[in-house]
Image: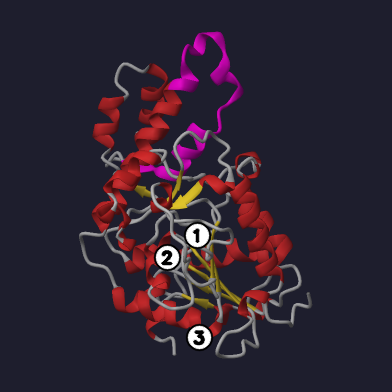
Amino acid sequence: MSSREPAPWHAGTAQTVSRNRVVVTGAGFTRALVPGAPLLVDDFNNDALEKKVRGLPNASRLLEWERSPRRNGHIDVERLMTRLDSLMPYDYAEDADNAANEYAFLLSELKRAFLDRLHEARKWHIHHDELARFARYCKANGCCCITFNYDDFLDEALARTDSWNPYWGYGFFCPSSRDTIASFEELEHRSVLRLLKLHGSVNWRPKLGYANPVAIDSITHHHEWAGVPRSYPQVAGHLEPEPVMVPPVLSKSSLVEQPVLRLVWSHAFNSLAEAHEVTFIGYSFPTTDMAAQTLFTEALKDLPQKDINVVNVNLSREDSEAETVRARYRSVLGDIPDEQFHFDGALDWIRRLS
């Protein structure tokens, strides 16, 4: 397909999309729109986690190591999940005792604590108007959304348009969790837009009994905003307790072993390679995520730097942190012009969308 041709999922839309637009969102996007959402470095009921692993020497040591550099005892949730998910060779040594099982337990508890924080965030203020405005912008411009976030706040906003639904919109067919106990003859329309979640999602729940790596046809969408848990409370008993979530990793093996992520990353690569314009919103470009750096380096190699926009946290352009952001992006994507960096924050950028 020529990079100047509209992507196939744009066919049949009311308007003709002349430019393939891609938006890439990171944790800063969610935090701006959902102020109660956790930061990557935050308190995930860390004292309670510490109590749960008391008596497990390896897990206790690792948690203490993560908490000790910060006075408030906060943890970098993705860094810790990465370490727990990607075992080191010495974790298998005889004197390591039961390290692998201890780390698996701590990882499971950490994921549960992360999900609890997201659940609590829904009880507080959310910028619904701005989320809706962003969703309308994506609809009007036929945007492909690529995200590194696990949360489903954007999913919900897109579902309120008539251009995206969770059955087709994730880049693979993802039935509702209610389909585990009932049969539905009519499925929703195919999704015009795509939301590609490169590290999985809190609402991707495998059917009960499916072990890792999870088969694509075992994954369902399960979320409160669609009313499934309330209308069908028995559904959860037919699902695995943990969602499909893979933290950023130095090695790409954890991503490659999950069939659903192989598919989603392939869609993301193609969408980026065909893009006329790419906007990064609230994405920190972490140096530890080698897989993401490889994706953007290879997929965007032919996109002119003037067609790359970066929307970041509210900073002065002369701020040293702003210069760090510019340097980080340029080290991967080339000499992006200064004027393509926007440091007024995601909320202000969204409010200016037409």
Residue at disc 2, secondary structure: helix
Q: Which quadrant is home to the C terminus?
A: bottom left
Of the image marks 2 and 1, the number of the one nearer the N terminus:
2
The residue where tag 2 is placed is: 155
Q: What is the distance, in whole Å, between disc 3 and disc 1 at their CAs?
A: 27 Å
Residue 61 % position (x, y) = 39, 23
Which one is nearer the viewer's eye here, 4 or 229? 229
Mark toward the viewer: 3 or 1: 3
Give the answer, above or below, for where 59 lies relative to 73: above
Query: Residue 160, percent across and down?
Result: 38, 74
Mark 3 or 2, nearer chain start:
3
How much space separates mark 2 and mark 1, taking CA atoms?
Answer: 21 Å
Q: Nearer the viewer, residue 44 or 328?
A: 44
Secondary structure beneath disc 1? loop
Residue topped by disc 3: 140
Give the side of residue 130 with respect to residue 300, left or right: left
Please state if 90 lies on the left or on the right of 233 as rendered.
right
Q: Quadrant of the N terminus?
A: bottom right
Q: Position of residue 193 (x, y in %)?
A: 54, 73
**Which residue is located at x 52 percent, y 66 percent?**
169
Q: Which residue is painted at 65% across and 39% down in the image?
A: 253
Residue 108 among magenta residues: no
Q: Residue furthest right?
A: 2
Residue 272, image quadrant = bottom right
Residue type indicated by callout 2 = Asp
> Which contiguous range is marked in magenta?
74-101
Q: Residues within 10 Å of mark 2 (few under 14, many from 20)?
A: some
Q: Amino acid at mark 1?
A: Ser
Q: Of helix, strand and loop, which one carries label 3?
A: helix
Q: Is residue 126 left or right of residue 88?
A: left
- Position of 14 relative to 42 (above/below): below
For mark 1, what is the residue?
Answer: 284
